[in-house]
Image (cartoon, rainbow, N blue to C red):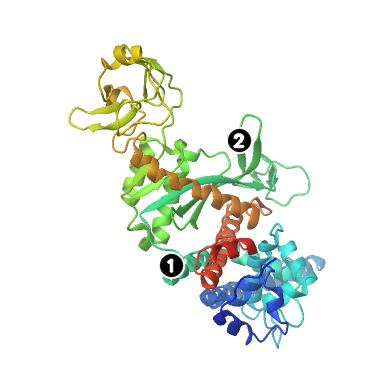
Amino acid sequence: MAMPIISQQTQSALIPFPLIPHQWERFLDVPFVLPALTFPWSIFRGIEQEYYQHLYASLRKERMNRSDKASNANGSALGLELPTPIEQVDDTSGVGRSQSGRKPHNFMPMMRAFELARLMYVEIMAESVYLQVRSNPLFAEACGFTGKFPSYRSFARFDQIMTDFGLWEKARQLVVEFNLKQGVIETEDTLVADTTHVEAEATYGKQMKTCGHNEDCDCPKVPTDDNVGIVRKSTAVSYVGHKVSLLSGAKGQLPLTREVCKGGEHDALTLQPTLERFKSEFEELAEPVRYVLADGIYQTPGNQKVTKDVLGAKLLAPINPRNRKDKSSDARGIDKIDRYGVPHCIAGHKMELKGCDLKKEQYIFTCPVHNPQAKQEGLVCPHHKHIECCNGATQGRVFRIDFSTTPQVDPEFPQHSRTFYTLYDARTGIERIIGMLKDGYSLRRVHKRGRKAVEAHGDQCILCMHVMAYCAHVQVGTVNRGWTRSRLKRAQ
């Protein structure tokens, strides 16, 4: 396979990399090599400091708990009930600490490992990342591991701390802001929203005890996963999983934020929390937004109001007919008005929307055969029906419908207008984003339980896609969300 052109800047960046003695030019077709060497991971230094602070606090708490258990065990053996000293609860810094101490494992290699392992098409969890580091020397060196490798427990603790304290979320926000400053993404006036499901490793409805009793008891129980639900894709296909709402730019086509909901949550109810999160995270990106594109399930008066209140924008979504049916018409030359609000003439053609009369609150439809501005190639109208419908008019029939007759149509931005079709064509970009996140970045399944774990899982996937987009932008000057050689070559 042909190798992509590597810029002189990238070649110079490969030479001084001190931790890896290999000639990395030979491994540029390995997906994790370029992001490991060229992405400026130093932007996460603030996250690194927070991680160490939480790590030290977590280790102190573990030492204190071990000390308490040991004291209680000794007291039970002697038949004594030992109270816990107040000083021991308040001052945890010296509990169980060794005289010399031990330096924790470096943050950056661990973060690279969790992010770049998903580029090798493995389901991401602490076990799989640990095994990739242990079994793949090239991957371990690219991530920056030297000397003795961390244990599996260190990987699990790293992921747990990053998840519990929202550090993956902060890292996602940092990389989006970084790409905005670098010109990888730009401010846009149009956003795209959609939902997808993430399969869960949990049993729906299963509960567990929190009391610690081994025998049967009446103590209250809690669900094993507080966010899992039934995701129904069709009457025959359903999943036990979580629902994730994503928001991206219409042109940039990179995910910007996410909102995690229960699996059974209705799609239409996910828009408000997604827009609110986006505005709170990225005010600079939210300010110029004028339109939000979404699927027909989002087309409700409530979502129209939410979009306007949160972003001051207009929600553009196709008509959702729901339970409406076609209605016959008594107007001359008109056969029916279908459930989407479009009139059909007696020749069986759908009429074209010409415009709106706001004073009379009416939609104006015209003939798709004879009107030169709405004419569709290939359509013909029998002469006798043309006479019956239009009285032989040169430009065909003009038909008006009151707004109240078709409430499913949005009078502020009618879905049958050509302007709507032009803007709405950009919505399909988020379908490709979701496909790439699932197939190329391991979004498809989450192996830990709970809402926080799903949020962290989504943040890691979005972060990794932005890392790859930055690397592609540096290499070929074009934003690319994948890593394959053929895509980089086509971008050149």
Give the x, y percent position of residue 154. 71, 71
* Residue depicted at 36% across the width and 40% down the height: 420
Few, some or many residues within 10 Å of mark 1 (<14, 14–19, 20+): some
Give the x, y percent position of residue 311. 34, 51
Give the residue pinned by disc 2: 232
- 83 left or right, relative to 300: right
Type of amino acid under label 1: Leu
Element marked by disc 2: strand
Number of numbered callouts drawn = 2
Towards the viewer: 218 or 156 = 156
Type of amino acid under label 2: Arg
Q: Is residue 147 visible?
A: yes
Element marked by disc 1: helix
* Residue depicted at 41% across the width and 23% down the height: 339
Q: Is residue 83 visible?
A: no
- The disc placed on residue 180 is 1
* Residue depicted at 70% across the width and 58% down the height: 121
Towards the viewer: 114 or 226 = 114
Towards the viewer: 19 or 425 = 425
